[in-house]
Amino acid sequence: TQLLEQSPQFLSIQEGENLTVYCNSSSVFSSLQWYRQEPGEGPVLLVTVVTGGEVKKLKRLTFQFGDARKDSSLHITAAQPGDTGLYLCAGARSGNTPLVFGKGTRLSVIA
Amino acid sequence: KAGVTQTPRYLIKTRGQQVTLSCSPISGHRSVSWYQQTPGQGLQFLFEYFSETQRNKGNFPGRFSGRQFSNSRSEMNVSTLELGDSALYLCASRQVGLSYEQYFGPGTRLTVT
């Protein structure tokens, strides 16, 4: 059973479009991270959210942590080809337990 | 600060052989975790080391082992390689604290033939 479910699995959009990626769980997390991974490279940390209801913005990317700390979303405004990659969410139940990763959303932005 | 480094970046081995992968964490990071990434299973946690002690272990067979040295550098070893061990092996380091922010290395691509 996958503890963190990400949707959609694949997304192909045109440059300039908006999109939202979801990360859902039935478990509560003390913190949740979003990473972006490009082919042949390791994931790069984009953001960490720790407070229920928290919203963080990183340029055109908006991250939200659910009020109950069980889910999160990533919204990209006016997507660009440089946004192409695998987006992974990962949750920590506590500071001492391993991170649990979703299987990722593979985004392709076509110019 | 230099990022997490992993060596080698690519490796081809034959079934039955063993392999050792190396990871140097970000300076000051005492926790090192290892993950296996495959297209079908995604990122799966192998183990975490902190101050030379294994802190957490994932659900992998005993063929997978690791260790951490006093300078926080870590190695993982896979013995009796199987075809299914072909994967990207990722190492991540972090400062132990309230927020579980990990920083990943570029990975070692292992191919078992």
Image: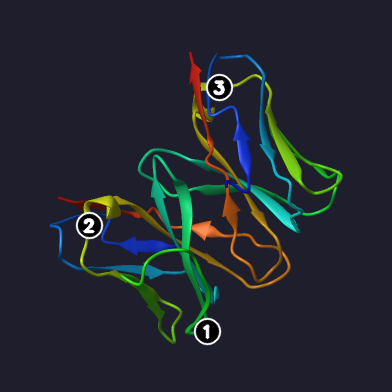
Check disc 3: other Cα within 10 Å, few if <14, some if 14-19, many if 20+: some
- The numbered mark 3 sits on a residue in which chain? A
**Circle 1 SS class:** loop
Q: Which amino acid does label 3 sit on?
A: Gln
Residue B91 figure quarter: bottom left
Q: Quadrant of residue B94?
A: bottom right
Q: In this view, does B64 lie to the left or right of A18?
A: left
Quarter occupied by residue A74? top right
Q: In this view, does A96 lie above or below A45?
A: below
Marked residue chain, label 1:
B
Image side of residue A88 versus residue B98, left or right: left
- Residue positioned 53% across, 58% down in the render: B103
Amino acid on which disc 1 is placed: Ser
> What is the secondary structure assignment of the residue under circle 2?
loop
Mark number displayed over residue B82? 2
Identify whether B36 is placed above or below A96: above
**Picture coordinates of residue A23, whole percent (x, y):** 67, 38
Query: Observer-nearest residue: A6 or B70?
Result: A6
To the question of a shared chain for discs 1 and 2, the answer is: yes
Q: Residue at x 59, y 54 (%)?
A: A100
Which residue is label 1 attached to? B51
- Give the percent coordinates (x, y) of residue B4: 44, 62
Chain where mark 2 sits? B
Give the residue displayed 56% in from the left and 14% down from the top: A15
C-alpha gap between disc 2 and disc 3: 40 Å
Vertical arrangement, residue A106 with respect to residue B17, above or below = above
Q: Distance between the residues labelled 1 and 3?
A: 42 Å
Q: Position of residue A26 (x, y in %)?
A: 73, 46
The CA distance from mark 1 to mark 2 is: 30 Å
